[in-house]
Image (tube, rainbow, N blue to C red):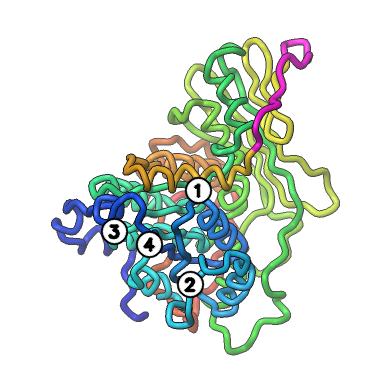
């Protein structure tokens, strides 16, 4: 644990042979019906959910190894997966805890891995998985800072050269009804997109452990990981960790073209933990041809809640995701989705494992990185109080996620960003 590789060290020390040598896929090595061994890295609620979908996506898979920073999480996850019977084959020898657990899972003989730790670790774990020749599912977001996004892009490049699949966790892209709605937008049935208004207004997330319950034996790093959503170096903040789904759908509506800039605001109104993340944002993304797209995100108690996309077009509006429909310019509904509504999380894994079985190319790395960067753009514009351009962000040296920290290390919480004072590195 004292010599864990860092995101930058991967780029600096990986040999040319490691980076360019082709790695045979499981299908080429073992045949189309080979049993695929799954490794789960990060087994909280979303990680356990991803394991559920992976085990349901293919008849010849087995959960082979599991890893988390905390051993208690492992047992909770395995208890929730008992219904899969023999498909869960994780003896104690393949249950790994600690900050180096991901390395042990990758070395256990797995073929595919599910990455679902706090996103501050995602770039590091993704690079290690790709270097180890594994097919990867990476939960959103892909990073919390500019350095992490650039690392993800490099990992995606290496994965493509090794013929490895790379699937993302932006789940609404797999929702049948939401796909149909955005399909109508992209087909031009409503005319040109002129604006988007997306909301992600929810309640206040509870910390994993109350500040009053901090064990004196826990160092700063362990304490912060136990309450990772409150710390920007681990979570990236709620615009990135939670509302990135809405940010991603803004990108989707805009056909994933690059924005010009963002501006916005927000703050920390109700949050009372000892972290440093804001709890509300109002951000506007500026796109070519005078198109402005807006997101309203907040985590407030006792307040109006809504998660909704409104894609405003020349001839009407498309609304999603709860009830996906289109309206004409007078507000009259002229189409509503009434087709299949298979669980979007399951569709994601079904398509991923189908690609692995068929030996098809599936690499969503560039898209994963760009949607993550779009959320970072909005966050940085709000935090700084400035209009931040897409080019400025890509040229930034921002690196929030420290490397090689240990549980017992001292790591003071960074200050809460103040607009006009905070600056993008």
Q: Disc 2 marks which residue? A: 89
Whether residue 346 sits left or right of residue 273 in the image: it is left
* Residue 310 percent location from the top left of the image: 68, 27
Q: Residue at x 37, y 47 (%)?
A: 356
**Residue that badge 4 annotates:** 124
Contact (Cβ within 8 Å) of mark 3 with mark 2: no
N-terminal of the two: label 3 or label 4? 4
Q: Which sits earlier in the primary sequence, circle 4 or circle 2? A: 2
Quadrant location of residue 400? bottom left
Q: CA distance from mark 1 to mark 3?
A: 19 Å
Q: Secondary structure at mark 2?
A: loop
Q: Which residue is mark 1?
A: 349
295 in magenta:
no
Specify the segment rendered in magenta. 328-341
Image depth: mark 3 or mark 2 in front:
2
Q: Looking at the image, can residue 144 be seen? A: no
């Amino acid at each position: 644990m004292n010599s864990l590789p860092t995101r930058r060290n991967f780029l600096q020390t990986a040999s040319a042979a490691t980076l360019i040598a082709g790695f045979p896929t499981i299908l080429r090595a073992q045949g189309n019906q080979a049993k695929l061994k799954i490794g789960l890295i990060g087994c909280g609620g979303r990680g356990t959910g991803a394991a559920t979908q992976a085990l349901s996506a293919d008849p010849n898979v087995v959960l082979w190894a599991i890893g988390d920073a905390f051993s208690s999480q492992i047992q909770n996850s395995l208890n929730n997966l008992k219904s899969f019977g023999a498909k869960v084959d994780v003896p104690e020898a393949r249950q790994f805890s600690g900050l180096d657990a991901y390395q042990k899972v990758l070395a256990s003989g797995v073929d595919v891995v599910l990455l679902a730790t706090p996103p501050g670790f995602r770039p590091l774990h993704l690079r290690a998985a790709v270097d180890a020749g594994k097919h990867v599912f990476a939960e959103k977001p892909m990073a919390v800072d500019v350095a992490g996004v650039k690392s993800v892009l490099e990992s995606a490049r290496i994965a493509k050269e090794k013929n490895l699949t790379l699937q993302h966790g932006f789940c609404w892209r797999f929702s049948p009804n939401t796909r149909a709605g955005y399909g109508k937008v992209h087909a031009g049935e409503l005319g040109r997109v002129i604006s988007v208004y997306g909301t992600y207004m929810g309640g206040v997330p509870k910390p994993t452990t109350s500040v009053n319950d901090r064990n004196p034996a826990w160092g700063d790093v362990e304490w912060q990981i136990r309450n990772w959503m409150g710390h920007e170096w681990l979570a990236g903040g709620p615009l990135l960790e939670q509302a990135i789904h809405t940010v991603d759908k803004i990108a989707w509506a805009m056909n994933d073209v690059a924005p010009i800039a963002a501006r916005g605001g927000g703050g920390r109104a109700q949050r009372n933990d000892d972290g440093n993340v804001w709890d509300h944002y109002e951000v506007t993304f500026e796109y070519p041809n005078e198109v402005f797209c807006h997101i309203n995100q907040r985590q407030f108690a006792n307040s109006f809640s809504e998660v909704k996309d409104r894609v405003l077009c020349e001839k009407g509006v498309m609304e999603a995701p709860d009830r996906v429909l289109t309206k004409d310019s007078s507000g009259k509904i002229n189409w509503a989705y009434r087709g299949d509504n298979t669980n979007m999380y399951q569709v994601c894994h079904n398509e991923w494992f189908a690609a692995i079985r068929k030996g098809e190319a599936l690499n969503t790395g560039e898209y994963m990185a760009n949607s993550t960067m779009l959320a970072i753009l909005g966050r940085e514009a709000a935090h700084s109080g400035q209009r931040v351009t897409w080019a400025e962000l890509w040229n930034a040296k921002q690196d929030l996620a420290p490397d090689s920290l240990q549980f017992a290390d001292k790591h003071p919480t960074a200050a809460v960003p103040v607009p006009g004072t905070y600056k993008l590195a």
